[in-house]
Image: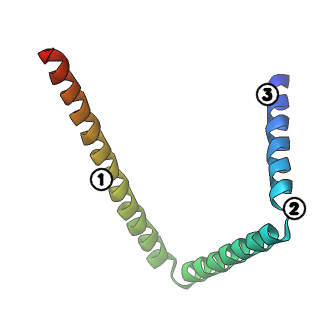
Amino acid sequence: MAKQRGLFTLVTGIVMGAAAAFLSTEENRNKTKKVISKAAAEAKKVKAQYDKDPEKFKKSVVAKGKKIAKKVVARAELKKNKVVKKVVKKTIKSANS
């Protein structure tokens, strides 16, 4: 357990150091503030939608999730087909040799 804690401490230290280095310039701090503000505004908007009609919001989220899942599956199918074509091509090539 001690080794895991040590590793966690090391990783945390590295992340904190990277964050400090990134936020050391004013330009990066301003960019970070803008992103945080935008995320907070979006969160408030989403909460307002949920508070207005929770059932409609849930249906909307499920529909968006299904849409994203279909896209991911389609991309996976394309990649799978490319891999299969490469394997078939290599197999044919090695069989002919």
Residue 80 picture quarter: top left
Identify which residue, 91 or 39, lies in the foreground: 91
Q: Nearer the viewer, mark 3 or mark 2?
A: 2
Q: Which of marks 3 and 1 is in front?
A: 1
Q: Where is residue 74 in the image (x, y as percent from the top left)?
A: 30, 53
Point 55% across, 85% down: residue: 52
Q: Residue at x 42, y 71 (%)?
A: 59
Q: In this view, does 16 lie to the left or right of 69?
A: right
Question: Can you identify the residue that label 2 sits on?
Answer: 24
Residue at the spot 79% in from the left edge and 74% down from the top edge: 30
Percent position of residue 68, x then y: 40, 61
* Residue denoted by label 3: 4
Type of amino acid at the residue the image marks with label 2: Ser
**Relative to 52, residue 61 above or below:** above
Considering depth in this image, is 64 or 51 the residue closer to the camera?
Answer: 64
- Residue 10 sits in which quadrant? top right
Residue at the outermost bottom position: 52
Give the residue type at disc 1. Ala
Render colour scheme:
rainbow
**Marks 1 and 2, how far apart at CA:** 42 Å
* x then y, percent, for residue 86: 25, 33
Sooner in the amino-acid sequence: mark 3 or mark 1: 3
Question: Which badge, 3 or 2, is on the more N-terminal residue?
Answer: 3
Q: Identify the residue at the far left of this view.
A: 96
- Please name the amino acid that badge 3 sits on: Gln
Q: Against 29, is 71 above or below?
A: above
| Disc 3 from disc 2: Cα separation | 30 Å
Residue to which mark 1 is pinned:
74
| Residue 57 against residue 64 in the figure, above or below | below
Q: Callout 1: helix, strand or loop?
A: helix
